[in-house]
Amino acid sequence: MTDHRNGYTLSELLVVISIIVVLGLALLVSLNPMEQILKGYDSRRKSDLTKIKIALESYYSDHSCYPVFPLKDSLNRPSYACDSTFLQPYLNTMPCDPNSKKPYVIYLSPAGTVCPQNFAVYAQIFSFFDPNGNKIQNCANTVTVTSAGMNYGEISYGCSSTIPCAEHFGCKAGVCIKLSNYEQPGCTTNYCTSDCGGVNCSFPSNTCQ
């Protein structure tokens, strides 16, 4: 008589279950759902900033000024209420950060004017997914959209309240020269780098002492 077995043995079931679990874990690690969620937030932030920029430029085209925002945030910067209709008809509702649910940071220039001529809008992102997230001095993990006239110093100041140095002077081969723009810590013309051995640069003689 032939012995016909129905189903699987316990050991066979355990092997199959183990294989399914291992494959599932491998798939989960490869997809990294949290990373995908964070990337999605960053994409939404960039999209929101683009929408705000387009609306502000349209507003400027009609009024020759950028709008004075109606609210202030905790640092006394221009702000707005989430989902408000403040920029209608240029933007139906004002977007906010998809994770924190707070308004995006706004900087207007000149500060305190009733007719701003420049703007910058900032968003905090997870910069380890985006190399552009650390391009603004003193503003880590930050991306921005700005008006065409906003210079780098204002962009950095708008999100950090720190004024980067307009010019960085130092000594090279015994001669005092301008090394770069908008860098710290060279906030005065007598600042020298380690190349000078601790000596000072003096202007206007352009020599190291």
Image (cartoon, rainbow, N blue to C red):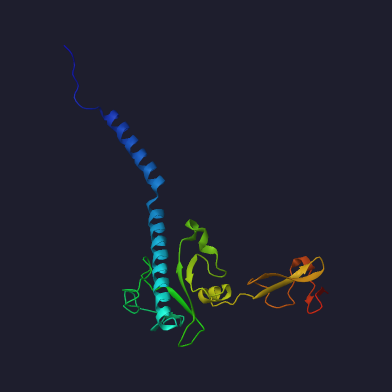
Q: Give the image location of residue 83, x and y in percent.
A: 31, 74
* Residue 144 at x, y percent in the picture: 48, 69
> From the viewer's perspective, is residue 38 above or below residue 68?
above
Question: Can see residue 68?
Answer: no
On screen, residue 99 above or below 167: above
The image quadrant of residue 20 is top left
Q: Quadrant of residue 91?
A: bottom left
Q: Quadrant of the C terminus?
A: bottom right
- State the residue lying farthest toward the front: 62
9 or 175, which lies in front?
175
Residue shown at the point (33%, 39%) measured from the top left:
21
**Residue 111 image offset from top left, x and y in percent:** 50, 84
* Residue sitting at the far left: 1
Residue 123 visible in the picture: yes
Q: As drawn, is 45 to the left or to the right of 7?
A: right
Q: How many numbered callouts? A: 0
Quadrant assignment for the N terminus: top left
Q: Relative to residue 114, is residue 162 drawn left or right?
A: right
Q: Residue at x 40, y 58 (%)?
A: 38
Is residue 145 rendered to the left or right of residue 186?
Answer: left
* 52 in relation to 132, above or below: below
Q: Going 45% across and 76% down the picture, which residue do you hit?
A: 106
Residue 203 percent across, percent down from the top left: 78, 79
**121 to 71, vertically: above or below:** above
